[in-house]
Image (tube, rainbow, N blue to C red):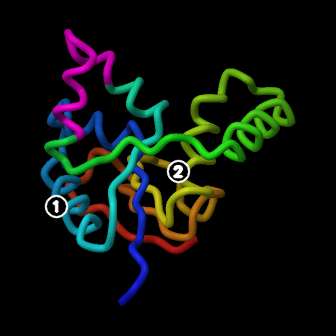
Amino acid sequence: MKDPIITAIDTSVLLVILRKEPGWELWMETLADAAKDGPLVICPVVAEEISIYFERPYRSLDLFAALGIQIDDFDPMVFQTAYHNAIRDRRTDLLPYKLVTTHSFFQANRLALETNIAPDHFHGPAIILYRKNAATTAKPKIAKP
């Protein structure tokens, strides 16, 4: 039996789905495929960022449950590494972003994100699910940077 592949999900993907932006159905398919490999997780930062889109923030938990997403608490090393990187880069304003990506690096095998950044410029987990251009209707790709 193979070890499960944990997929962390970025806020960007959930916003595409929540807002029903172009390609949201493709993300739903991609996440369903990823769930066959193992758990879908979000970190507390993503959970909080999504909760503001609901009149009652706890209703975001219904969305996560419907998508089969678990909220994964931070390993202490995530805080230390993300904070260190934000301070090193002199960009503490990027701490939430650093927490999300560091969580995926330490606690998941891949990260699903909606981005215009080429995967070879992203320093994170070994496998990234991404769509390079949100205007396209192409299914998200699996890339190995």
Which label was assigned to residue 39?
Answer: none
- For the residue pair 81 and 143, the one nearer the viewer reads as 81
Residue in view at x 57 percent, y 48 percent: 103
Return the residue found at the far bottom. Answer: 1
Instruction: State the SS at label 1.
Output: helix
Q: Is residue 12 above or below residue 126?
A: above
Report x, y in % for residue 61.
24, 31
Q: Looking at the image, is mark 2 or mark 1 earlier in the sequence?
A: 1
Q: Is residue 80 above or below residue 126?
A: above
The three-letter code of the residue at mark 2 reads Ile
Q: Which residue is mark 1?
A: 29
Report x, y in % for residue 29.
16, 61
- Classified by dominant secondary structure, the portion drawn in magenta counts as helix
- For the residue pair 96 and 119, the one nearer the viewer reads as 96
Direction from residue 107 to residue 42 in the image, left or right: left
Direction from residue 16 to residue 8 in the image, left or right: right
Q: Does the magenta run of residues contain 63?
A: yes
CB within 8 Å, label 2 to label 1: no
- For the residue pair 127 and 3, the one nearer the viewer reads as 3
Residue in view at x 67 percent, y 21 percent: 93
Q: Which residue is mark 2?
A: 117
Report the span colored magenta: 51-64
Q: Looking at the rendering, which quadrant does residue 145 occupy?
A: bottom right
Report x, y in % for residue 8.
43, 53
Image quarter of the N terminus: bottom left
Report x, y in % for residue 18.
20, 33
- For the residue pair 94 and 81, the one nearer the viewer reads as 81
The three-letter code of the residue at mark 1 reads Glu
Q: Looking at the rendering, which quadrant does residue 64 occupy?
A: top left
For disc 1, the neighbor class at 10 Å (few under 14, some 14 to 19, many from 20) is few
Residue in view at x 75 percent, y 44 percent: 81
Q: Does the magenta run of residues contain 68?
A: no
